[in-house]
Amino acid sequence: MTPRTTLGLLLLLAPASLLLALLSGSIDISPWALLTHSAEPLAQTVVFELRLPRALAAFAVGGMLALAGALMQVLLRNPLADPYILGISGGAAVAALLSLLAGLSGLMLAGNAFIGALASMLLVFGLAHGRGAWTATRLILTGVIVAAGWGALIGLILALSPERGLHGMLFWLMGDLSHTPPPLWGLLACGLGLLLSLPLARDLNVLARGELAASALGVTVPRLRLLLYFIASLLTAGAVTIAGSIGFVGLVIPHLLRLLGLRDHRHLLPGCVLAGGSLLMLADTLARTVVAPQQLPVGVITALLGVPLFLYLLNRRGTRL
Amino acid sequence: MSTPLLTTHGLAVEIGGKQVCDGLNFNIHAGQRWALLGINGVGKTTLLHSLAGLRKPAAGEVLLNGRPIKTQPRRQVAQQLGLLLQEEGDAFPGTVLETALSGRHPHLGRWQWESAADITLAEQALVQVGLAGLEPRQISTLSGGERRRLSLATLLCQQPQLFLLDEPTNHLDPHQQVTLLKLLAAQTHKGTRGLLMILHDVNLASRFCDQALLLFGDGETLHGSAESVLTAENLERLYGHPVITLAGPDGPVYLPR
């Protein structure tokens, strides 16, 4: 399958996933009624005011996470990197849990999470930059240590929180889309992230072969690294703000697509947005329907779906990572 | 005489408090083939990276086609100068053809895709280094010698005027060593391109290079035509090891005693 065919199929997967998300749930609606607006008013309301915004938010978050993951993996020259490796989600989580502890919700909660993510991003950047060279190893070590620090604070907050607040906190930590803000901002951020990173795509191909090799082939590496760091961090901050720290999408989608032949970043980056978005829409649909009326954190579903799928592709005959 | 491809003015390079060269003035002209020789750890690679503008010199400057290399954008540098690195691991998958094509990177605009002509160029480069037929192979499945030849193909695809090569013969068997050095030497035959390469085999250096630059350590250097510089006396001093000179079919052959 050529990369373009794969991209074309992903382009079909996105609306198909959206349709599935709109049709699934406790109130049944036929595809025909949906398309012709001829359903009962209650069903219309449920589909267009509850399911649609949630599905679009899921698409935006999944797209941002997968895109951020792909950028982070090249920035750190480490295939194991995910958007959370540098502690951005940790900073957001600490701010979000403190907000929950203080009884905040909605936009205040999201705003604080975003501030927490930005603070963590600047902290890691400042510490890793220091006075000396800004190597991938130094950045990754700084990020991992800062993330560990946030992890300790998260544990502390959880331990000291009253029991009735724990459920909400746990959902936030595992990633959850049931209280998302309107999806427009997420979709805009996702689109902007893709627009900003696409012009860098061929530079990324070269950077993936090493920093010296990239310099020798005409890439201004320090500037590219800076751009990558900020684009990936802001995308992650946006995703975490909307839906908490949903795991696995950012790590696995880029690899999945590489295994499917999208090695060129000019294909991989748009592919990540489409595949990450679609997967998260599907996962969220499952999260709210499998044990309905109870809802699951979507992060649990992404991991449960992603792990076997990834292992299968990795062990497929003739595949080499 | 036309502008040299590369000029150094009073170049001083240091690494880890050690002087690699000091006050080095030399020119690489089109058509010339330079050998860069010295013992392990003397700073050959460091000097090569400084010449390529990837490392700031302690003093002096490097001119590429008459203009300071540090003021030229990296992309513009890469259109004129190609660098063969020692090794770098590959963390991400890629095919042989994709890797060779990356040599076109500095010649393409931001939104430009590789054209059919670029692909032909990459395929020809792969033929030249003897990797024809391996285009769809994953680079992780290549042997050390094949990778080395792929790096050379990428460099040929880049089509620079000046080649800077860090041990191009590393990992290669004797047949491949000679084949590839011939290929590289042929690049300079039209008199529009030049090269400088780090070599550890003095006999390959004297066979394929017409100029030599010796790094003695402590910042001391010696350069000039290969015949005048590659003498038993200089080589004994360079490597700190006695050298035997034998009469070979194309001139003297040097062996460590």
Image (spheres, coloured by chain):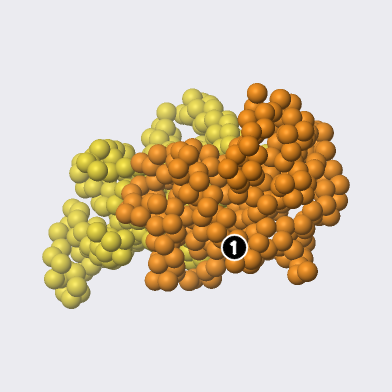
Chain colours: A yellow, B orange
A95 on left or right of A134 = left
Give residue B188's quadrant in the image: bottom right
Measured as percent of width and height from the top left, residue A67 is found at 44, 54
**Residue B158 seen in render:** yes
Q: Which residue type carries mark 1?
A: His
> Which secondary structure, mark 1?
loop
Query: Viewer-proximal residue, A227 or B256?
Result: B256
State which chain disc 1 sits on: B
A174 on left or right of A227 = left
Measured as percent of width and height from the top left, residue B172 is found at 47, 40
Report crowding for label 1: few under 14, some 14 to 19, many 20 or more residues within 10 A (C-alpha).
some
A252 on left or right of A106 = left
Give residue A25's quadrant in the image: bottom left
Give the residue at x 74% y 38%.
Answer: B231
Position of the N terminus of chain A, as image quadrant, is: bottom left
Query: Viewer-proximal residue, A311 or A162?
Result: A311
Measured as percent of width and height from the top left, residue A261 is found at 32, 54
Give the residue at x 65% y 23%.
Answer: B257
Query: Viewer-proximal residue, B18 or A59?
Result: B18
Residue where numbered disc 1 is placed = B189
The image shows residue B116, relative to residue A187, as above or below, that is: below
B237 on left or right of A133 = right
Measured as percent of width and height from the top left, residue B100 is found at 45, 56
Give the residue at x 22% y 41%.
Answer: A317
**Residue A178 seen in render:** no
Position of the C terminus of chain A, as image quadrant, is: top left
Give the residue at x 39% y 46%.
Answer: B139
